[in-house]
């Protein structure tokens, strides 16, 4: 249910705590999230260091962060599907596969953005 009325510091603090709870759950239960989080920990500082100017830095760091965001959403989809029905259903499988495909598309975007930005410097 949507919150109504004034959203003050207490509500913002609660929202922050729920987000941290989500990060902890993803770290604890999702191996893919742990791997991608480790990549983000490496890639964000590298992107800030290797990027030439604000737009390049932004492109190099936002792509891995989007992967992490998509992985969180994919994990949420999988958890809800598993909660609703543990037995296989074609639509449940399709939902899980589509979430996985979204993560894959963003991983391709990471590879392309890093290759297009840094490739000419390394191989040109």
Image (spheres, rainbow, N blue to C red):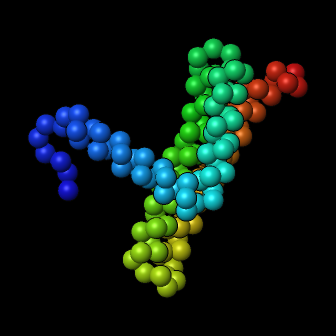
Residue sitting at 80 percent across and 28 percent down? 119
Q: Is 89 left, or right, of 42 in this rendering?
A: left
Whether residue 99 is visible to the viewer of this picture, yes or no, is no
Where does residue 34 sit, x and y in percent of width and height?
62, 52
Q: Is 57 left, or right, of 21 in this rendering?
A: right
Q: Residue furthest bottom?
A: 87
Where does residue 3 sit, x and y in percent of width and height?
18, 48
Q: Residue furthest left?
A: 5
Whether residue 116 is visible to the viewer of this picture, yes or no, is yes
Q: Is residue 28 above or below residue 9?
A: below
Q: Is residue 118 above or below residue 1?
A: above
Q: Residue furthest top?
A: 53
All told, the count of numbered labels is 0
Quarter-of-image position of residue 62: top right
Q: Is 54 left, or right, of 1 in this rendering?
A: right
Residue sitting at 35 percent across and 42 percent down? 16
Which one is nearer the viewer's eye here, 54 or 16? Answer: 16
Quarter-of-image position of residue 11: top left
Q: Is residue 93 above or below residue 98?
A: below
Residue sitting at 19 percent across and 34 percent down? 8
Which one is nearer the viewer's eye here, 82 or 116? Answer: 82
Q: Is residue 2 above or below residue 79?
A: above
Task: Tell me the quarter of the image containing the C terminus.
Answer: top right
Where does residue 105 sit, x and y in percent of width and height?
62, 50
Quarter-of-image position of residue 115: top right
Q: Is 86 left, or right, of 63 in this rendering?
A: left
Task: Tell me the quarter of the image containing the N terminus.
Answer: bottom left
């Amino acid at each position: 249910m949507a919150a109504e009325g004034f959203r003050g510091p207490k509500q913002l603090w609660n929202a922050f705590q729920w987000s941290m709870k989500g990060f902890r759950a993803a770290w604890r239960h999702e191996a893919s999230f742990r791997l991608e989080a480790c990549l983000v920990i490496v890639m964000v500082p590298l992107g800030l260091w290797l990027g030439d100017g604000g737009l390049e830095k932004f492109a190099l760091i936002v792509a891995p962060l989007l992967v992490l965001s998509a992985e969180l959403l994919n994990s949420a989809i999988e958890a809800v599907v598993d909660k609703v029905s543990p037995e296989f259903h074609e639509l449940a499988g399709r939902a899980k596969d589509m979430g996985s495909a979204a993560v894959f598309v963003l991983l391709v975007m990471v590879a392309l953005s890093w290759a297009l930005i840094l490739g000419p410097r390394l191989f040109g």
